[in-house]
Amino acid sequence: MHGLQERILTPDIALPATAKKLYKELKNALLRASEEELIRSPQADIARLLRLDPRGTEHLPGNVIIGGTLDTDFKRIAPVTDLFQRHDGALFRFSIIVAERGRSKPLDLIGYVFELRFPDDVVQDARTPRFIRFDLNVPDHNNESKGLRCHLHPGHDDLQVPSALMTPGELLELFIRSVALPERPRAV
C-alpha cells in the first residue's frame, strides 16, 4: 500500500496561496449551490457554519477551515442545524487543515475530513451505505504507517479504501453535485 499511497499523495494540486482565499472559494461555491437550490442551507446558515480559524484548534494546529460541526460525530447524531443540507436531504460537513508558505506559493494541504450522510428514509437496507467520508490524515497519523493517509470510508468507520488526493473544492463539488444514491437500487 505504501507505493500506492506515495503516488496518491504526490500529484500537484492547485490551491490558492492563503487560507483566506480558500475559505472564500468554498464560501462562494456554497452560496452558488444555495442560489441554484442544490443545497437547502440558506445563506445565513452558510455564514454561520463556515468558519476560518487561522490559529487552528487544540487538536488541529494550523489554519483550519470548518464547514459544519467540527466534532467527529461517529454516531452521526449531530443536529441538522449543525450541518449543510443538500436538496435531497443528505447532510455534509468538512474540516480542512492548511499551512501557508508565503504569498507566491500555494497552500500546503495538511489534512481534511469530508463526510456525506444519507437520509435515514433513503437508507433502506444493509446494501445502502449510511455515509461516505474522505479523509486525508495529518502526517504521522497511525494510518500513514499502513499506507492509508488518504482514504475513503464507504459507509463504515473501520473500512478504509485508498482514495485519490482531491482539493477541498473538488470534494465540495463532488458532495454538492455528484454523489447521490440511485433512485432504484439494483436488484439482488
Image (cartoon, rainbow, N blue to C red):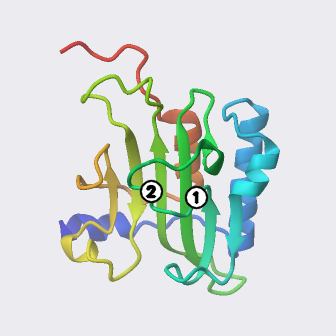
Relative height, residue 9 to residue 155 (above, below): below
Disc sitting over residue 73 in the figure: 2
Whether residue 28 appears in this view of the structure is no
Answer left or right for 87 relative to 166: right
Amino acid beneath label 2: Asp
Disc sitting over residue 69 in the figure: 1
The x and y percentages for residue 55 are 66, 84
Q: Residue at x 57, y 26 (%)?
A: 88
Mark 2 residue crowding within 10 angstroms, few (<14) / some (14–19) / many (20+): few
Q: Which type of secondary structure does the marked residue at label 2 adopt?
A: loop
Q: Residue at x 67, y 69 (%)?
A: 16
Q: Residue at x 39, y 45 (%)?
A: 132
Quarter location, residue 80: top right
Answer left or right for 28 relative to 63: right
Dividing the image into 4 quarters, which one contains the C terminus?
top left
Answer left or right for 11 relative to 106: left
Q: Residue furthest bottom?
A: 102
Whether residue 145 appears in this view of the structure is yes
Amino acid beneath label 1: Thr
Dividing the image into 4 quarters, which one contains the N terminus?
bottom left
Quarter location, residue 106: bottom right
Q: Are marks 1 and 2 in contact (CB under 8 Å)?
A: yes
Q: Which type of secondary structure does the marked residue at label 1 adopt?
A: loop
Q: Residue at x 60, y 54 (%)?
A: 169
Mark 1 residue crowding within 10 angstroms, few (<14) / some (14–19) / many (20+): many
The x and y percentages for residue 152 are 34, 53
Viewer-closest of 26 and 15? 26
